[in-house]
Image: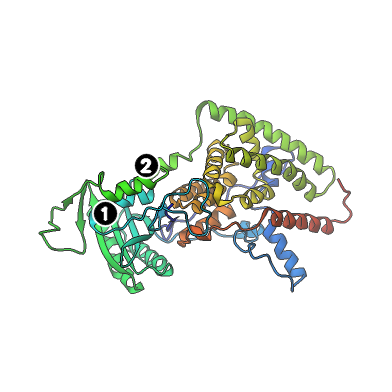
């Protein structure tokens, strides 16, 4: 499997959006259920660990704790990050079709097939397979490793439209920074689209990337099955009218096709459609099942509310949710699926952060194919208000699996529902920064998640010692 990551840079002044309206706190309503489980209103296992460390300064944190959860109780205070350049989709990197560094060579491991970019035709043949969709109105930057020109990293950016010098400079700066941070010494790039949109970005890349110590070995514009070179002015090989190309039977494309676990989609929109909300009979069944699941959770909340303890509410929901999600993970690993009633219950209980974080901690890379199916199904089937958790888990597993394009469209779905959802924002920061899948490590073990939440609930009990026990 080729390693996959995403640039994810955006327009400098394009804000992520406003927070969703505050929820009605009426116990038993869908809004109240969501508020009780909100990513923005509850501290997480990381917060509990931080509080423990503050009480015992000499205590050492478990080495895995630092990765995934910034005190999420602070997330409601966070302001959306300012976007920095045109939005990118996601990119695949790595010269080989082999398992990502740091992951197990387990189920569905890709065969070792090395692809080298040694010509414009080879570059054009490989790019769609690296992205897993046909790019358009895009600048694709492929970091390679000398002397064999093997692919190390790929970044795709939307072209600023209309053309914008500031946006072009931001794309070039981001690409240069990521390439340099990855220790890459050479790069090729292809702009897909009309000259008036591609040329400003190409010019910026030619100026900025070499300043980072990266040699630009090829820089093309492709449109309507013809390409033009920005580095070659010889009319014999690069005529003004461009060079026609057809990479269908190119050896590099055939090698990638033989190694790939998926087909090349026609566009990024088609990729986004693979995680879009279901419609028709399934959607109607999910509506009914979700209302039923909300009623079940409302009963748990009402039962716990009589005790007057906030921790009791979390404990009851988590107990029910942990069992259901654990069984769903096992079912998908066995090759099975779930129906609307089970899916609805899962999406509702996954709003509880302990349930979500326990699921996150169980995303072992050797089962990544099964996990991709699970979270894709739940992301598509989830009703409004319940998309963030499965979509964010899908994004993590996609990044872990080397599919940055899928990670980005999953993050898009989560942030479309809640622009402040902290897990999705953290994952976006990771893939935007060019972090490779080898860094998509599990943040905690299930045992550490359980211990942290147990301590959090114990702290809540200490803060309200007069409350009766459930």
Which structural element holds mark 2? loop
Q: Judge whether 440 appears above or below 305 on screen.
A: below
Residue 39 in view: no
Q: How is the image coloured?
A: rainbow
**Residue 113: percent from left, percent from top:** 37, 53
Q: How many marks?
A: 2
Q: Earlier in the sequence, mark 1 or mark 2?
A: 1
Which residue reaches farthest top? 281
Q: Is residue 379 left or right of residue 306?
A: left
- 348 and 106: which one is in front? 106
User: Which quadrant: the C terminus?
Assistant: top right
| Residues at marks 1 and 2, CA–CA distance in whole angstroms | 19 Å
**Residue 69: percent from left, percent from top:** 62, 59
**Residue 419: percent from left, percent from top:** 54, 51
- 329 and 300: which one is in front? 329
Residue drawn at point x = 47 percent, y = 60 percent: 436
Q: Judge whether 149 appears above or below 334 on screen.
A: below
Q: Judge whether 281 appears above or below 459 on screen.
A: above
**Residue 430: percent from left, percent from top:** 51, 60
- 195 and 349: which one is in front? 349
Which residue matches tag 2? 265
Which residue matches tag 1? 122
Rate crowding at label 1 as few (under 14), some (14 to 19) or many (20 or more) other CA atoms within 10 Å: some
Residue 83 in view: yes
Q: Is residue 166 left or right of residue 59?
A: left
Q: Nearer the viewer, mark 1 or mark 2?
A: 1
Residue drawn at point x = 21 percent, y = 53 percent: 227
Q: Is residue 214 left or right of residue 425?
A: left
Which structural element holds mark 1? helix
């Amino acid at each position: 499997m080729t390693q996959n990551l995403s640039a994810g840079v955006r327009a400098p002044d394009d804000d992520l959006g406003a927070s969703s309206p505050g929820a009605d706190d009426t116990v038993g309503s869908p809004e109240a259920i969501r508020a009780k489980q909100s990513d923005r209103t509850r501290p997480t296992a990381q917060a509990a660990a931080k509080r423990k460390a503050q009480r015992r300064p000499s205590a050492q944190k478990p080495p895995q704790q630092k990765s995934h959860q910034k005190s999420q109780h602070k997330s409601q205070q966070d302001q959306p990050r300012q976007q920095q350049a045109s939005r990118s989709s996601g990119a695949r990197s790595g010269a080989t079709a082999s398992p990502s560094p740091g992951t197990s060579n387990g189920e569905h491991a890709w065969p070792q097939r090395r692809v080298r970019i040694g010509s414009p035709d080879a570059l054009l043949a490989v790019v769609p397979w690296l992205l897993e969709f046909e790019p358009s109105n895009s600048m694709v930057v492929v970091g390679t490793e000398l002397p064999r020109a093997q692919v190390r990293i790929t970044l795709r950016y939307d072209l600023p439209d209309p053309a914008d010098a500031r946006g072009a400079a931001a794309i070039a700066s981001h690409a240069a920074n990521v390439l340099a941070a990855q220790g890459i010494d050479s790069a090729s790039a292809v702009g897909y689209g009309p000259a008036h949109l591609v040329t400003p970005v190409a010019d910026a890349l030619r100026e900025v990337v070499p300043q980072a110590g990266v040699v630009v070995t090829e820089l093309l514009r492709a449109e309507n099955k013809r390409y033009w070179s920005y580095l070659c002015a010889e009319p014999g090989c690069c005529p003004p009218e461009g060079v026609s190309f057809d990479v269908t039977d190119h050896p590099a494309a055939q090698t990638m096709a033989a190694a790939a676990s998926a087909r090349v989609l026609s566009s990024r929109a088609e990729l986004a459609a693979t995680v879009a909300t279901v419609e028709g009979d399934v959607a109607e069944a999910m509506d009914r099942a979700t209302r039923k699941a909300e009623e079940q959770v409302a009963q748990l909340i009402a039962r716990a509310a009589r005790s007057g303890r906030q921790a009791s509410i979390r404990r009851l929901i988590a107990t029910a949710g942990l069992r259901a999600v654990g069984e769903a993970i096992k079912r998908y690993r066995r090759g099975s699926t779930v129906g609307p009633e089970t899916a609805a219950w899962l999406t509702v209980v996954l709003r509880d952060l302990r349930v979500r974080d326990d699921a996150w901690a169980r995303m072992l890379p050797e089962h990544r194919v099964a996990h991709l199916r699970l979270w894709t199904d739940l992301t598509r089937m989830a009703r409004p208000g319940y998309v963030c958790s499965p979509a964010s888990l899908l994004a993590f597993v996609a990044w872990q699996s080397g599919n940055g394009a899928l990670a980005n469209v999953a993050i898009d779905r989560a942030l479309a529902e809640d622009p402040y959802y902290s897990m999705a924002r953290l994952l976006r920061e990771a893939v935007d920064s060019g972090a490779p899948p080898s860094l998509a490590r599990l943040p905690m073990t299930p045992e550490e998640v359980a211990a942290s939440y147990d301590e959090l609930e114990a702290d809540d009990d200490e803060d309200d010692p007069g409350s009766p026990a459930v």
